[in-house]
Image (tube, rainbow, N blue to C red):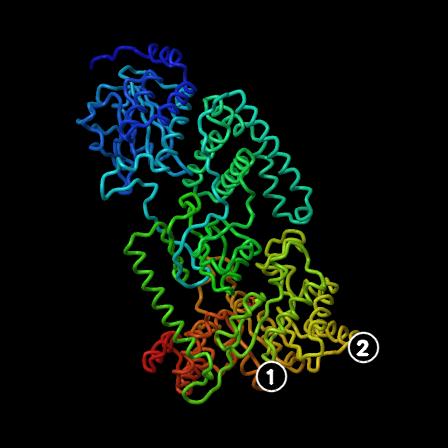
Amino acid sequence: MERPKDTGTKAIDSIKSSGGPRVLLRDLRQTMAESLGGQERLDKIVDLIAQNMGAEVCSFYVLRDDAALELFATHGLNREAVHMTTLRVGEGLVGLIAADAKSLSLDNAPSHPSFAYRAETGEDKFHAFLGVPVLRAGQTLGVLVVQNEARRVFGEEETEALLTTATLLAEMLATSEFEALIKPGADIDLRRPRSFEGMGFAEGVALGQVVLHDPRVVVRNFVADDVGHERERLEAAIRTMRVSIDDMFTSGDMQVSSEHREILESYRMFAHDRGWVRRLAEAVTGGLTAEAAVERVQNDIRARMQRQSDPYIRDRLHDLDDLANRLLRVLTGASSLFEQRELPDHAIIVARNLGPAELLEYDRSRLRGIVLEEGATTSHVAIIARSLGIVAVGHADHIVSMSETGDDIVLDGSEGRVFLRPTPDVEATFLEKIRLREKRQEAYAALRDVAPVTKDGTHITLLHNSGLVADLPALNETGAEGVGLFRTELQFMVASKLPRLAEQVELYKEAMDFVGERPIVFRLLDIGGDKVVPYLRSAAEENPAMGWRSLRLALDRPGLLRTQVRALLQAAQGRALKILVPMVTETEEYCRATGVIQREVERLARSGAPVPEKLELGAMIEVPSILFELDELLVHTDFISIGSNDLIQFLTATDRANTRVANSYDPIGKPRLRAIKLVVDAATRHNVPLTMCGELAGRPMEALALLAIGMTKLSMGPSSIGPIKDMVLRCDLAPIAQSIGAVLSGEDRDRNIRDLLNEWADKQNLPI
Ligand code: PEP
Ligand code: MG
C-alpha cells in the first residue's frame, strides 16, 4: 500500500497561520451576516472550516427524521455526493459519532472496522479523520468531519475548535437556517415526532402546546468580540452563581429540609468543580461568548445524560445540567424560574419534576396537562393533578431536552403515553378520542341529578375525595352527595411552611361553606410516608411508609393535632362536624386521638363559643392490625372508612409508591376482598356507616366487587363519579352479590373474582 505523504506539519502550521478557532468563528459570523442562499452559505462554511483547520476535507452531515445522515455540504469530497450520500445512524464512522454523540479522531480512517466506503464521495484517499457530533440540548443533529490525506492525529485543541464550530451549526439548524435544503417529504431529526412510554398519573387525553417549566435560555450571540471580556463575564457569572447557591443554604426553607440540602450540596460541589470550570474557560478561549460556552459544555452533559442508565450518575448529570441553566440565566439575565408566565390556551407543562405548589401557580383555566420525567402515581403533584382534572403522565424519559416550548404535544394519561410533535394521523386519532370522551362526559353530565340506584333498588351513596378548595366546585357538576374524604394534609404539602391556625380555619370554613348541607368528612393530618411535608421532616427513615407518620406522628406531636382540631371546631361555627382519624392501628390509639378532640370541644364550650351541633368521629381502616379488633373499635366509632390504598399495600407487602411492585396483586383478589368483607360484616353487626375511600371505589370493576360484598358508600375522585354511577344504574346487584358471596365463602372455590365479574358485566352489559 502506498504510504501517504506526511502533510501533518503543514496542517498544524496552517491552523496557526490562519488564526485558529477564534478567527474561524469571526469569519463564520461574517458569513452568517452575508446575504447568501442556504446551500451557498453552507458551502462557504465548510470551505472556511477546511481552510482554517488546514484540512483537505470538511463535510457536514445532517440527521434526518428517517435516521439517515445526509451529506449536506462538503469541501474536498465529490460535490455530486452532496444530498445524495447518506449513512444510517450507527453506520460508518459518521454514523458511529451520531450514535455515541462523541468525537472520534483517527490517523487512518479506512482501517477502522466501522469505516463505510461510499464510492461517490471519493473518500478512500483520506486517512486522518476527525469527526464531532453536532449537538443541541444533548440531541445529535448531525456530524461535522474534517479529513486529511496524510496520516496524523488531530489533537485536543483541534477537536475543541471543531466542537465549537459545531455548536454554531447546531444553532443554525435549530433556527431553520437550512430549511430550503431539506428534500420535500423529509425533515431534520430535530423536528421528528417522538413518542414516550411513561406512566399514567392522571387519566384523560389532552392535546396542546408544550410549555417548558424550566424554559431553555436562548443564546443569541455565539461569537465573542473580545475574548478577554468574555472570560471576565464568565468568571463573574460563576462567582454570582456560587454566591446564590450559598445564599440558598441560609435561606429560611432550606434550614430544615435535609433533601434540599443534599441537592444544594451537590450543586455546590459542581459549582466548584475544576474540570467543569476549565471546560467552560476553554470554550471561551476558543472564541465563543460566555453563554455559548455554557451551552456547548451543557450539550455534552446532556448527551451523556441521555445515554446513562445508572440512576445515580444520571441524577448527578441532571444536577450539572440544572447548574448550567442557572449559569446561563445569570449570563443572559433571563427571568427566574418561577415567574408567572403567560400560558397558551392549551398549555401542557413539561418538566423534570414539579412540586405541588408549582403546579398550583399555573393558570388552571389554560392548563390541560403535565408531563414529567420523574414522579410517582401517588406523588403529591399526581394527586393534585387528579383532583383538578389535569391529565398527567410521568416517567417520560428525556422529554425535557427533546421538546421546545410551542411544540405540539398529545398526552394519554390513561395509557401513560406522550406524542411529541405528533403526526397528523396520531393527532386525528386523539382528537377523535377527545370527542368521544366529551360525548361520554355529556352523557355523565346528563346523569347528574339521577339518583344512583341499582336496577334492583339498592341506593349507592357516591361521594368525592377532595383536599383543595379548587377541587370542590366539581361537586356541583357531578351531583355527588358530598365529600367522603377531605385530605387535610394537602394544604400542608403545598405550603412551604406550617400553615397557621388561622390559615387552617380559613380553608376548613371555605370548604364547609361550599358544601353547605352536604356532608363533608375531614380527615386529620395524614402526613409522613409518601406524603412528604419537608418542613416537618425528622431524621431520614429507612422505611418511611412504616415510619413516624400519620396518627403516630400526631399523637407524638399533640400540639399539631390540637391546633388542627381547634381549627376544625372554629371553622364549624356550631355546624355539624365529621372528623376521621387516619391509620388507626389499635383501638386504644383511636381513643387517645378522640380524647384530644373531646378535650378541645370542652375547651371551646368553656370559652362560650358554639360547639358543633353534632360531632361524629370515625376511624380509617387501612392498617391490617385493626381488622382483628373491629368489634372493640366499632363501639367507639360513629362511622368508619376503608383506605384501600394503604390497606392493600400493607396486606400484600407491596409499596404503593413503587411502580415496579404496586400493581403486582389484584386488589379484588380473594384475600383482599375477604379482608374488606370482614369490615363490611363488622360494620353491619355494629350498625356503623361504612365508606370506601381508596382508589378502588373509583374503578368500575372494583366498585362492582365492593357493591357485591355489601358496600353502599363509595368516595372517589370527581372524574370517576360519572362512570361509577353509569355502572350502578345498569346493574342488577342481587345475583352478582350471590355469586361473589359463594366464591368468598368457599362454596364456589375455584373461581377468580375478576373473571366472574367480567362474565356478569357481559351478561348485564355493564360498562366496566
Ligand atoms: C387510602 O389509604 O386508601 C386513602 C384513602 O388514603 P390516602 O390515599 O390518602 O393514604
Ligand atoms: Mg391512607
Q: Amino acid at mark 2?
A: Gly
Vertical arrangement, residue 398 with respect to residue 52, above or below: below
User: Which residue position holds label 2?
Assistant: 608
Furthest-front residue in this view: 35
Q: Identify the residue at horizontal 62%, vertical 81% (top origin).
A: 631
Q: Which mark is residue 729?
A: none
Give left or right: position of 172 versus 576: left
SS of the residue under disc 2: loop
- Whether disc 2's CB lies below 8 Å from ligand 1 is answered no
Q: Which of the pair 243/695 is nearer the observer?
A: 243
Amino acid type at circle 1 is Val
Establish whether ligand 1 lies closer than 8 Å to the Cβ of label 1. Answer: no
Q: Is residue 556 visible?
A: no
Position above or below: 141 against 591: above
Q: Residue 162: image x %, image y %?
A: 38, 24
Q: Is residue 459 visible?
A: yes
Q: Quadrant of residue 240?
A: top right
Left or right of 518 in this view: 504: right
Q: Position of residue 285 (x, y in %)?
A: 48, 21
**SS at mark 1 in the image:** loop
Quadrant including the C terminus? bottom left
Give coordinates of residue 676: x percent, y percent: 52, 76
- Circles 2 and 1: CB distance less than 8 Å? no
Q: Residue at x 40, y 58 (%)?
A: 416
Location of ligand 2 given as a quarter of the image: bottom right
Please give the residue where the numbered disc 1 appears in the rendered image: 688
Of residues 487 and 411, the one nearer the viewer is 411
Q: CA distance from mark 2 to mark 1?
A: 32 Å
Q: Residues within 10 Å of mark 1 (few under 14, many from 20)?
A: some
Disc 2 crowd rating (10 Å Cα; few below 14, some 14-19, many 20+) is few
The N terminus, quarter of image: top left
Residue 745 vs 530, above or below: the answer is below
